[in-house]
Image (spheres, helix red, strand yellow):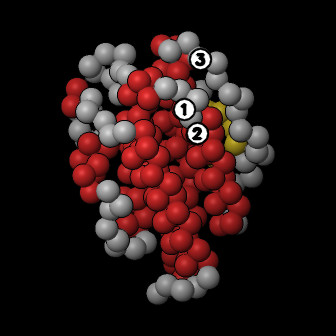
Amino acid sequence: MHDISALLREYDRARAYTDELWKDLTPDEVTWRPHEESSAIGWHLGHQAHVAHFMVRNLTAAEPSPDPELDGLMDSANPEKFRGALPTVQRLTVFRDTVAERVHARIGAITAGNVGAPDQLTVVAHHLLLSLINHEYQHDRWISEVRAGDLGHALPPDPSSDRLSRIDGYLVCAPST
């Protein structure tokens, strides 16, 4: 099993790669959709953070959403045709950063033993982080398709880590090395 601190570094690496995929784009490019039955890059950015918050909240600590107004919009159960009215890039950035800080804080509390059932939650944290990392990369694939295929921008190089590989074209952090 990966060390939790190593998985947190992988989580940060995945988020940094996501940032490389979109931070140089204009706000119009971030919110543009190829067609009504698709999601803008901005939706994927919000969804990645929404899922991270949802999983931390439901698996380790019941805490309120950092931006409850985004919860319905960023839920993948929301049909793509209703994903057009996105918040500003600044709001998405704050949302993503706040969720990442909460992931770090909660995982930090678990590894420090400042929770009930710290051994059990360590197992949960391990699987939670792997899921968050792989979910981030899953959506990075789709962000990449819009960035390169539709908007015509070059893709950054893949992140460098001996824990990463590609499966079916997706970057994946495997459960063991």
Q: Residue 131: horizontal and vertical position, in percent?
A: 51, 52
Q: In this view of the protein, can residue 168 be seen by the observer?
A: no
Between 128 and 42, the one lying in front of the other is: 42
Q: Residue 8: horizontal and vertical position, in percent?
A: 64, 60
- In the rendered structure, the answer to whether residue 173 lies left or right of residue 30 reads right
Secondary element at image label 1: helix
Q: Earlier in the sequence, mark 2 or mark 3?
A: 2
Q: Measure the C-alpha gap from mark 2 to mark 3.
A: 14 Å
* Residue 89, picture quadrant: top left
Give the residue number, with chain letter if any, for mark 1.
22
Q: Residue 135: horizontal and vertical position, in percent?
A: 49, 44
Q: Amino acid at mark 3?
A: His
What mark, if any, has residue 19 been given in the picture? Answer: 2
Identify whether 154 is placed above or below 5. above
Residue at 71% of width from left, 61% of height from top? 6
Q: Measure the C-alpha gap from mark 2 to mark 1.
A: 5 Å
Residue at 53% of width from left, 71% of height from top? 105
Find out whether the residues at labels 2 and 1 contact each other: C-beta distance under 8 Å: yes
What mark, if any, has residue 153 been given in the picture? Answer: 3
- In the rendered structure, the answer to whether residue 82 lies left or right of residue 130 reads left
What mark, if any, has residue 143 been given in the picture? Answer: none
Between 100 and 79, the one lying in front of the other is: 100
Q: Residue 15: horizontal and vertical position, in percent?
A: 58, 46
